[in-house]
Image (cartoon, rainbow, N blue to C red):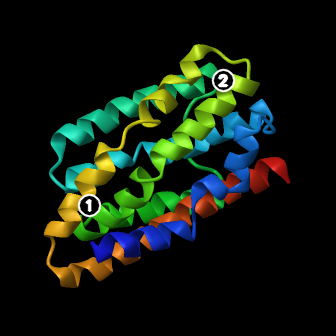
Amino acid sequence: MDFKQALDNKIGDYNLLNHPFYQAWSAGELPVDVLRSYAREYGAFISTIPKGWKTLNETETAEEETEHIDMWADFADGLDTAVSEAQIPQVKVLLETADELFSEPATALGALYAFEVQQPATAQSKLTGLKEFYHLPETVEPYFETHSHNEHEAEKLLEYIGALPSESHTTVVQACEQMSAALWNALTGIHDAECA
């Protein structure tokens, strides 16, 4: 499982739980306007996730992820906004990165792993912040509730990666690093645009 260690090392360099944006959220320090911006901008990325799973011929997971897009729309709606086209440059780069990496199986595996393996912890952190500090409709919570204990996607991806010829592992790890950096930078872009 040395490839898993390589993947986790790359992600460790961009651990989203350590990002100032998510730390401020879990501490209740982000204004609701900033959450609105995040819901609009990051929602454009959430809408790309099914494509990665389709590339892996994982129809059932792709359909599940499509349902999660609707849950994200409910999150946005609870904040009196809606998912829209990305405006922030770093979020646009994230969308371009996802589009490119989700097009080929090996890169889709690395990119999806970078996102999915972090999602239970980040979802739990955001959910805790929402419940403790923000007086918002309950419709903002289900997306994060669902993802705060949803680890089977990352496990499934590791199985697929393990079945690849070992010479493909470098490509997977590079894609993982590329996606990890793009996710981190997108949060920085939202944070800087709204909190600077």
Which residue appears farthest toward the bottom when viewing the image?
Answer: 167
Quadrant of the frame with the N terminus: bottom left
Could you classify mark 1 by the number of other residues whose Cα lies within 10 Å: few (under 14), some (14-19), or many (20 or more)?
Answer: some
Instruction: Please report whichever mark, 1 or 2, sits nearer to the chain's N-terminal start.
Output: 2
Q: Residue at x 82, y 49 (%)?
A: 195
Q: Which residue is mark 2?
A: 131
Q: Residue at x 41, y 53 (%)?
A: 117
| Residue 67: percent from left, percent from top | 34, 29
Q: Which residue is mark 1?
A: 158
Among the 4 quarters of the image, the one containing residue 181: bottom right
Left or right of residue 84: residue 162: left
| Residue 84: percent from left, percent from top | 56, 38
Would you place residue 159 above or below residue 80 in this image?
below
- Tag 1 near tag 2, CB within 8 Å: no
The CA distance from mark 1 to mark 2 is 32 Å
Q: Nearer the viewer, residue 44 or 116?
A: 116
For the residue labelled by badge 2, is the local secondary structure a helix, a strand or a loop?
A: helix
Quadrant of the frame with the C terminus: bottom right
For the residue labelled by badge 1, is the local secondary structure a helix, a strand or a loop?
A: helix
Would you place residue 62 above or below residue 167 in this image?
above
Left or right of residue 183: residue 149: left
Would you place residue 59 above or below residue 157 in this image?
above
Among the 4 quarters of the image, the one containing residue 99: bottom left
